Image: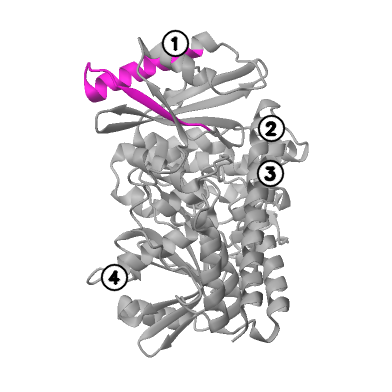
Amino acid sequence: MIGNRPTEWAAAAIHDAFAAYHARFRAITHQAKARFEARDWLGIQADATERLAIYKAHVDAVLAAVRDGLGAHATDPSTWEEIRWLYGALIVDRDDCELAETFFNSVTRRVFSTVGVNERVEYVFPDASPDDLKDDDATPIARRYPRVRDTAELVARILGDVPWRAPWRDLPGDVAQVAERIDTAVRAAWGEGAFHAVEMIESPFFRNKGAYLVGRLLRGPHVRPLVLALLHGPDGIYVDAVLLTSDEASIVFGFSWSYFLVDIARPRGAVEFLASIMPLKRIDELYTAIGYNKHGKTELYRSLVRHLRAPGATFEFAPGEQGLVMSVFTLPSLNVVFKVIRDAFGPPKRTTRRAVMDRYHLVFVRDRVGRLADAQEFEHLEFPRECFTAPLLRHLCEVAPSVVQVDGERVVIHHLYTERRVTPLNVYLREATADAARDALLDYGQAIKELAAANIFTGDMLHKNFGVSRHGRVIFYDYDELCLLTECTFRRLPEPSTLDEELAAEPWFYVGEHDVFPEEFAAFMVPDGELGELFRAAHGDLFTVEFWQGMQERLRRGEGPLYDVFPYHQARRLRRS
């Protein structure tokens, strides 16, 4: 056994590395307000990208230092048990204790290449109940506004308490419109009786061009979200939308958007607050939405374990068609799919495992504009064999034997991705009402356009590669052919000059690796009948070379996007643009 001094040093080194990571995380996050005030949209996106990289950099650095410092004891489990105990004493009073535990796990899993979990050297479950996020003794993260004479006066105080270094465009007008929206919603939900208070998280939430003031209306035991979406135009800051339902708030914090930049000292308190206004959101989704995706991953694993403990809990094939690159399964009680890369891909796929992983990383670091499902990457997971249906386990072992291995009564999956489960668009179009199918198909075309404006070309645009969320938004989730739009070469189909060319089953002309022919899209994008006619009327430009080349030109010139995408319906906007 190594002596106390090296273990104390190691615990302190990991603690200091975590503290440095979170200080840098918050420093980058803190810049978002100044970026918004200066309308520095590229700066906000650059900060968001930088922030994604710092976790791994700090883990890598302390891992190398601790391995070197512990020498021969660097992989001794009893040494790490003591380090874990000492580390726990260092973090117990931190406001970000749960994040510190996840950081420690990131180090020890790398040290031991842990398969499954090792409770001796990891924080597997917190001491408190996972559903008990109350932290009543801590400093509040929200400001409370008791009800005053009228709603307009209250709104004026809320908006006035955020110290912007930029002018409001029309603060009195915003106050009046916001107050009217609140009063209308409260009357509809709670009758004529007034709410008694409002609580607002003190720090604004920033993402791309938007800032969000997030709070809740209180009336006795009843809680209702209050989310004010702010924009900063050439003439000043203004309230663009008022969101007053859990569904609307949930879309703002959805799994298909980039993470928020919000400067909060006590993440657990913020998550508890957000959970109160979005009760259908899992805790892991809320941590991830505010930028703590690594701890979100920890909470997702804990949630998965709890679901698997239920009697009869069994993984099964996910609804929809199995892909040529990924095999996808799900747990019915958990709104998540699990995606395993196959060892070999059927034709016409010509990609590689490394290329697929690179595309998932590209999605991780890009602006997802509300149209790309966020994915969590897991390694070396272990499950009881009884948690798999026999056909699913047989399938996984056949198509991905290098990744999925059965050892007695346990199944080890060495690498997989998780995504939020949605209804595949092809399934949705078959089962939905006529109106819902129309809305989804039109949103499918809009999703492709919004992604293109963000320099993303989905590649394979088959309906089965898109899904519909519970809010009716169309999301893309199959990334094996995804690339930057500016990497593509959009071409017209050459006219055949002979009958043989016209009847040829295969292209009779040269097709480069990055060549794309938009005229071919209609064959698989447009359904038959009236629905197809509606789609062509709304999105027929997708089948033209001019649309795609024009989008490329805008991107290459660095012009603003053709579409400013915001996570709320046009009807919720105070002004029509």
Residue drawn at x 41%, y 12% is 152
Q: Are marks 4 and 2 in contact (CB under 8 Å)?
A: no
State the residue position of label 4: 309
Give the alpha-carbon distance from disc 4 to disc 2, as whole Å.
46 Å
Q: Residue furthest front?
A: 4
Looking at the rendered structure, the kind of residue marked 4 is Arg
Give the alpha-carbon distance from disc 4 to disc 3, as whole Å.
40 Å
Toward the viewer: 367 or 307? 307
Q: Secondary structure at mark 2?
A: helix
Number of on-image labels: 4
Mark sitting earlier along the chain (4/3): 3
State the residue position of label 2: 35
Mark sitting earlier along the chain (3/2): 2
Looking at the rendered structure, the kind of residue marked 3 is Asp
**Percent x, y for residue 433?**
28, 42
Q: Are marks 3 and 2 in contact (CB under 8 Å)?
A: yes
Mark 4, residues whose alpha carbon is within 10 Å: few (<14), some, or many (≥20)? Answer: few
Up the image or down, 316 lies above or below 555; here it is below
Mark 1, residues whose alpha carbon is within 10 Å: few (<14), some, or many (≥20)? Answer: some
Specify whether residue 235 is in view. Answer: yes
Residues in magenta, as a range: 174-202
State the residue position of label 3: 47
Give the alpha-carbon distance from disc 4 to disc 1, as whole Å.
52 Å
